[in-house]
Amino acid sequence: MLWLQFMSGLQSAAILFLLAAGLSIIYGVCHLLNLAHGSFFMLAMFLAYSITEKFFSNSDTGFLVAVILVPSLIAILGILVEVLIFRHLYKADVLVQILPSIGLIFIAADLVRGVWGLESRSIDTPSWFSEPVAVMGAYIPGYYLFIIGTGALVSVLVWFLVNRTPWGLLIRATAANRDAALGLGVNVRWMFTSVFGLSSWLVGLAGVLILPLAGANPGSDLDATVDAFAVVVIGGLGSIWGALAAALLIGMVKAFGILVVPQFTIAFVFILMAVVLLVRPAGLFGKLS
Amino acid sequence: MCIEGSRYSGNGRSWLSKFGCAALLVAGLIGCCATTIGARADDTIKIGVITSRTGVFALYGTAGEQGVRLAADEINKSGGIMGKQIELMLADTNSKPEDAGRLFREQIAQNAFLTIGAVASAESAAASTLAKEKKVPFFTVGGYGRFLTEDAGHRYFFRLAMNVRGFYTPLARALAKKPLRKYCTINNDYEFARDLNRSTLAVIREGAPDVNVLDGCEFWVPLGTTDFASYITAIMSKGPEVVLFSGLVGPSARAFLAQAKSFGLFKTVLGAHASMGNPANATGVREKDIPDNIFTAGDYPYPPVDTPSNMAFFKSYRERWNAMPMSESAAGYTTMKFVAKAIEKAGKLDREAFITAAEGLDIDSPAAGRITMRPFDHQSTHGVWTGNLAWDSKDDRAGMSNVGFVESTEFLPSAEEVARLRSTASK
């Protein structure tokens, strides 16, 4: 039974990681707080719904197409937003940086409302995962294992990308010292744009994966932003491993906390945040700048 | 802050800080937006409408607002009230009680005759306090909390919509009749849900005093939660016979059902959600996620009740709004029609005369038939439908099966009970 709690905690962690990693990376490299992060997530969910349900009559093929297409679409959107809006704001005051992202939140929310209305939308879990899988004597839905597996795979891929590729080297250089990197001939502009692309891709994937479970709702953007910020605050802004560690921590605290105190689950994440910030004000893996 | 601009604004970037200031101004204006719809003339009757158009209760609020506006348009087309056109003043509370109070206050200041609130219970409560203070009638469309017309009810607060007791009382009595004693509860953590859970269990225990909520099996999840995996596994580990989840708001309820399906929770356990027969609470539920053993109730069931008045309402609403009507739509529609009728009966635009005319007045509601405004608590006699959660294939959404109708006399408190509740409340 505890094993099942652990697995459900892992599933939460996988989604939280996919959600928050991008936010953290953008801050780490571009020093930009993208408040509209959750809006990308919400758009991804609704797009995935339309692709799967409307164009493919809710078949497994539809889901597959959505998994491949939607993160790419959101990545393109992220790049567009960076090029058209955020690129001009890197040297501006933090408050001026934030305003356009707030504007984006409103635009995205109204767009979603206009196109999809206010009702919740979701899709069936793909039939490949409909059978529960026996793990250590307990049955866990196949789809949850799929999410955990995908989350693990993606975090390995991201690690590889950041630590073993030339691009990753340049990203780390830019994050460490933007001006020095610029001086050494790094195309910092392209770094920023590609980081936005990657971050949006991750958040788009999170949206597609969570759709059959959570459903796309008009309030999904703000819920996702709050969750993502909780993860980066605990993990440390700018640190991907912080995001992973924090996602795991939050997932486990929620999964096991409800066994201990089911009455006040609302407090768990915030208590965790308070404790972490008291001990390490910059987050678990963050650096005070 | 804005005027000095950013430190980097010297070299041609000053337009950006001006842009920032302008954006701030616009954002601020958006924040207190209010619109007016209808004829703009002195010869109009101004009706305030506050609605939770954004925020957690957006679906509910919008449905209510659309019902009110549909009715207002119909009334205006057939000559208005006493020959005058209705002018609606609309404002968005963003699902926040404090904004509900502020906007109602503004509408009173702008000479609204009364205000209709397509808002949830907490917002209705905030408005209720103000209604009493300013002696301006307030009608709730989306606030089901029973205290609104009972303990905290007063002369200036009205409800055509159903009292929440309709949702849980027949349901709880049906549950008490079953030989099932081990319960788990899971609800969103807000006051309405806490009261609903408490009241439901109280009624169940009237019929079955040994019903037991299992240790550590009473879950309160934050509003907006859609990740229920850990809760479901915890519930399954306790081995309950019934799971009560009435206090889960639409999106949470939908997510809970979908995830419960993956874990097979309802293969062995009975479920009960007192208001999934309210279409907004069953939003997005998919056919595959509906087990055959979820007890529920609703005040605007799907498939839609087949009466001429409901079919006409259903058709006009869909044509006008390109959306499916919800309970709040019907309640908003009925409320606007009732207000018009009461003003006509009073014969003049006087609030006290209006209230006297409204008490005891009846009105036809689209699905629930003729309902009456009880004079002693200003609650209508709107009944409830009970049944099992089921798929309505014709309308392509979740609805109910095995439907039975229960009259309000079965669940509304008597005049004596209301008086007693109000006197204990004021101590």
Image (spheres, coloured by chain):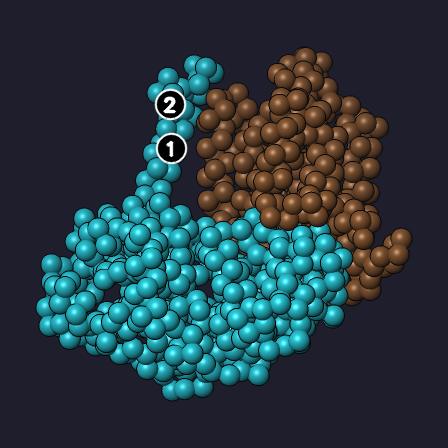
Chain colours: A brown, B cyan
Would residue A4 appear left or right of A213 to someone viewing this image? right
Q: Position of residue B16 (x, y in %)?
A: 43, 26
Q: Is residue B238 left or right of residue B358?
A: right
Residue indicated by mark 2: B2
Residue A96 lies, in percent from the top left, at: 46, 27
> How far apart are the two marked residues, 1 and 2, measured between alpha carbons?
9 Å
Give the residue type at disc 2: Cys
Residue occupying image coordinates x 67% and y 55%? B215
Q: Earlier in the sequence, mark 1 or mark 2?
A: 2
Where residue B24 is drawn, which disc sits there?
1
Specify the subunit that label 2 lies on: B
- Residue B48 location (% of width, % of height): 25, 57
Q: In front here: A177 or B309?
A: B309
Quadrant position of the C terminus of chain A in the picture: top right
> Is residue B87 depicted above or below B413 in this figure?
above
| Farthest-out residue, right | A136
In terms of image quadrants, where is residue B10?
A: top left
Residue occupying image coordinates x 37% and y 53%: B123
Above or below residue A229? Residue B150 is: below
Q: Judge if badges 1 and 2 mark residues of a common chain.
A: yes
How many dots with numbers? 2
Look at 66% across and 69% down and name the residue there.
B181
